[in-house]
Image (spheres, rainbow, N blue to C red):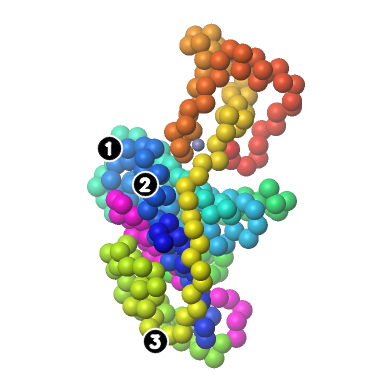
Amino acid sequence: MTDSLTRFVFEYAPVKGGIVQLDAVWRAVQGHADYPPPLRRVLGELLAAAALLTSNIKFDGTLILQLQGKGPVRLIVVEATSRKTLRATAKWTGDIPASDRLSDLLGQGNFAITLDQSQAGKQNYQGIVPMEGTTVAETLAHYMQSSEQLDTRIYLASGSERVAGMLLQRMPDQKSADTDAWNRATLLADTIKSIELLSLPPGDVLMRLFHEETLRQFDQEKLSFACTCSKDKAGNMLKMLGEEEVSGIVAEQGQVEVNCEFCDRQYRFDAVDVAQLFSSGTHFEVPTSRH
Ligand SMILES: [Zn+2]
């Protein structure tokens, strides 16, 4: 099964992890913009990373991974929901250098993780760190170490047809006689090649790496592409622009269009829609979370 997450734990050691492979999701993400290849690769890696982290969403909510910079690439954002859906987009200007280094694409940048569980009545969480490391995997591992004190190793591979990734985490607060397990697991995991992550079934990857360990493998979890945009949300964006500006556009062009940058869907509002929007009487509050 592709477009899935396979989680596993070491039966006798405090180590857990997951393997993800995305095909249709990756095609859907790529289908909405013509990303330059170096940016496409990084976007794919961040998508695989978000898919690996979906198991960290404990309540109804959304996990948002963002790389922000002032280089030719301004923003890469991936959202994963507790319903195991993913969406992603990026903003860039001009030519993108053919480089493997994140800093060549984004310049001095920040990496942010937001966990929005407000739907479930839980507090939102956001952590922002300066972008460290040359790759998405290094940046994420650094974030996990510095912000969550979690020993994490992450491996990401981004191809044109498929993206894949593997995550290893040392489980905290567990008394285990096997103090060498984490070192052993990461030494073995470090031998994985991108082509293996992209082409081998998850069970084969685990067998190839950890055949001397006892692993428990869980049922595969299906992941899919889905956008959470709607005409209501597009209308809220227009309300933030204000009646004067929106009515001005309608007077000039006959309608106003809001384009979803995640799925490329267009929401059109004509003069009647706009009049309804601003006369609905509902008090509009600027959302505290990102829209
Ligand atoms: Zn959308």
Question: x, y percentage for residue 209?
Answer: 36, 78
Front-most of residues 231 and 66: 231
Question: x, y percentage for residue 200?
Answer: 32, 67
Question: x, y percentage for residue 109?
Answer: 43, 48
In the image, residue 253 above or below residue 38? above
Q: Earlier in the sequence, mark 3 or mark 1?
A: 1
Q: Earlier in the sequence, mark 1 or mark 2?
A: 2
Q: Earlier in the sequence, mark 2 or mark 3?
A: 2
In the image, residue 237 above or below residue 126? above
Mark sitting on residue 212: 3
Q: Which residue is mark 2?
A: 27
Q: Which residue is depicted at the point 48% across and 55% down?
A: 223
From the Cβ of disc 1, is ligand 1 less than 8 Å away?
A: no
Kindly report which numbered mark, 1 or 2, lies closer to the viewer in this rendering: 2
- What is the magenta range? 155-175
Q: Which residue is depicted at the point 48% across and 75% down?
A: 217
Q: Is residue 93 left or right of residue 118?
A: left
- Which amino acid type is marked by label 1? Asp
- Which amino acid type is marked by label 3? Glu
Q: Which residue is depicted at the point 38% across and 65% down?
A: 155
Q: CA distance from mark 3 to mark 1?
A: 48 Å
Q: Which residue is mark 1?
A: 95
In the image, residue 130 above or below residue 221? above
